[in-house]
Amino acid sequence: MNQPVDVLIIGAGASGAAVAWSLADTKMHILCLDQGGWMKQSEYPSTGRDWEAKFYGEWATSPNIRGRPEDYPINDDNSPIKVVNFNAVGGSTIMYTAHWPRLHPSDFRVKTLDGVADDWPIDYDTLVPFFEENDRMMGVSGLSGDPLSPLTHPPMPPQPLGLSGPLIGKAMNKLGWHWWPSDTTVATTDYEGRARCINLGHCTPACAQGAKASTDITYWPQAIRAGVELKTHCRVREITVNEDGMASGAIYYDQDGKEQFQAAEVVIIACNGVGTPRLLLNSVSGKFPNGLANSSGLVGKNLMFHPYAQIYGFVKEPTDSNRAPPTCLWSKEFYDTDLSRGFVRGYGVQFGRGAGPVFEAVASEQKGILPWGKDHHRVFRKLNGHRMHFSAICEDLPEEHNRVTLDPVLKDGHGIPAPKIDYTLSENSQKMMDYALARGREFLEAAGATDICVNSPIPWGGWHLLGTARMGTDPERSVVNEWGRSHDVKNLFIVDGSVFVTSGGVNPTSTIQAIALYVADQMKSRLANLFD
Amino acid sequence: MIVEKSLTAAQRDDLRVISGMMIPQSDEYKVPGADDAAIQGDILATLGRDTKMVAAALDHVAKLAGKSLASLDEAKREAVVTEFRASGGAPAATLARVILQCYYRDDRVLRSLGIELRAPFPKGHVLPDGDWSILDPVKARGGSMRRAP
């Protein structure tokens, strides 16, 4: 029999770690359950000579390809964009590019400014102290003063420009377009026990140096020292409710596959925009026959991905390829609405420094630009180490038909119904992507690139899982209120990307964590009447 | 090895032939072909989860060839491989990938490319800081974010 806890957090990734750390100072009994385990840096891909090959197998970004016991399958056949994630302590911060933009102030007022989607019930200024606190905790490098981005104060200097940075910068200058060194969570100096980046160059599938911030090495050590308990390899099947319609705890499978019940006074879900609706929809009861916290019918709906429109080419000069973090610069030139472009809203751009030899060979062979036969060697030497990317992160507007439901057949290793994704690109997204590709082509031409190739959308580009339990003041049009509490279940909170009302056109992890800290702060300030 | 036994002798023969057609040996670049015995050994030893798809790809090759690819003359092999690349789908892509991922980690090949024979960790790489004056035009142009009401 597990002892009841005050707070049960489900998920130890980006948001679960942040909320656990913040709530720890209440001295409540806080327990976090995660379906994954602790990762070992000594076993990360870049420690071995087969570092690139692992990206196609046990370190694939797609859980369907990776198939670790900690993963759950996702039916994403009916989506041009496939879900990618990682399941472990640290969640998808183990396997991300560490690109660290924030949503812009205008992103919180989309309806007011552009007449589409909905405004958020909170604004950017509300989140500023939490963005700042999160940047300090995660350890951010960058250059303050970007005129087209929110003001940030990175505690570490930006990544070196390397070989690729000047090539990218010169091309953008030729076009008169904005660019700036990215804020990233790659430590450029020794920082809070983390060693500085030594340019392993294979950042996305985990950093063996520990220079890239993942919450297993940032928030969790501090949260655990402050008394938070974390149980690994515990997969939650459902959240239970009592006769008053309050969450009473969760049923989960422990490391041995044994069913367990954990009672809790408060339940916080931090399972991402696919895992969270999956859990809520699997939590069916007499009081909540359509899934928990779903009186609005919006649980699982309004899924937003950020379609990536990527265009790349090859320049004569050598680029950094696999000898640097993959992203170092961004552009906000096309971030804000300009209706003359033929679509509403906009996109951020992240530039890529290149790829390693195996990735280059595989991708170029698939694209048909690397021939078989005698000419293979000459062409490969022209391509390898000369790649330059332009990737537009297109704002995805919420549409109810883009959704997460439960697959009627597919189940995970514990027999829990798997999520099913139904997603189509909107006409607005398609126009934005086409426009971005045209601008990307101009950029590549300005850089002198040839052999131009396109991935639009990037098929395995569903990193950003947003909107499926949206935040709002109207219980009929949202799942949680303006401080993350379920409208229907007064002791149930959601802190991950599910609560996003709109997606912005940037990587969301910084904003997800700022929201998690904000929700924790709201909870702490309302402890006396948290359930009113 | 268990994995090696998962491909039949005929499949291994065709794997070697198709590997050599994809990446032939080159005196100019001083590199072996992908049909080199050590590279073939690496492919067979590390097929792992890709075994089923690779076997399916090689079965497809044999079906197109009517017999083993290895038994055909050069012109017929070319025709079969052209058809295979057009119609092979995911198994063909997997086969190409496993050949490439083993070829481009071979010491002789990496040496020819000027790449150090080591894992990225723990040595890492040195990155030049670069000339930051190229940011001056962006600073000079300035600009501002869209205001939110």
Image (cartoon, helix red, strand yellow):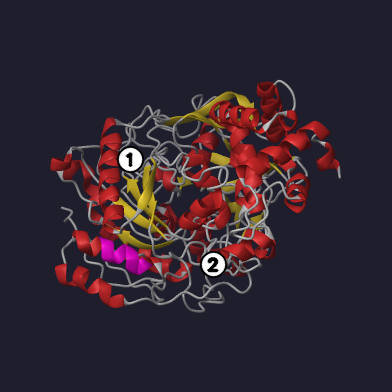
Most prominent secondary structure in the magenta stretch? helix
Residue indicated by mark 2: A218
Crowding around mark 2 (Cα neighbors within 10 Å: few <14, some 14 to 19, many 20+) is many
Q: Position of residue A400 (x, y in %)?
A: 35, 29
Q: Residue at x 65, y 22 (%)?
A: B64
Please give the chain letter of the residue carrying mark 2: A
| Distance from Cα at disc 2 to Cα at disc 1 | 30 Å
Q: Residue at x 83, y 34 (%)?
A: B9
The magenta span reads: A165-171
Q: Nearer the viewer, residue A451 or A532?
A: A451
Residue A123's place in the image compared with A69, above or below, is below
Q: Position of residue B32 (x, y in %)?
A: 68, 54
Tell me the number on the disc at residue A396: 1
Q: Under tag 1, what secondary structure?
A: loop
Amino acid bearing label 1 = Asp
Q: Position of residue A111 (x, y in %)?
A: 20, 41
Amino acid bearing label 2 = Thr
Residue A138's place in the image compared with A267, above or below, is below
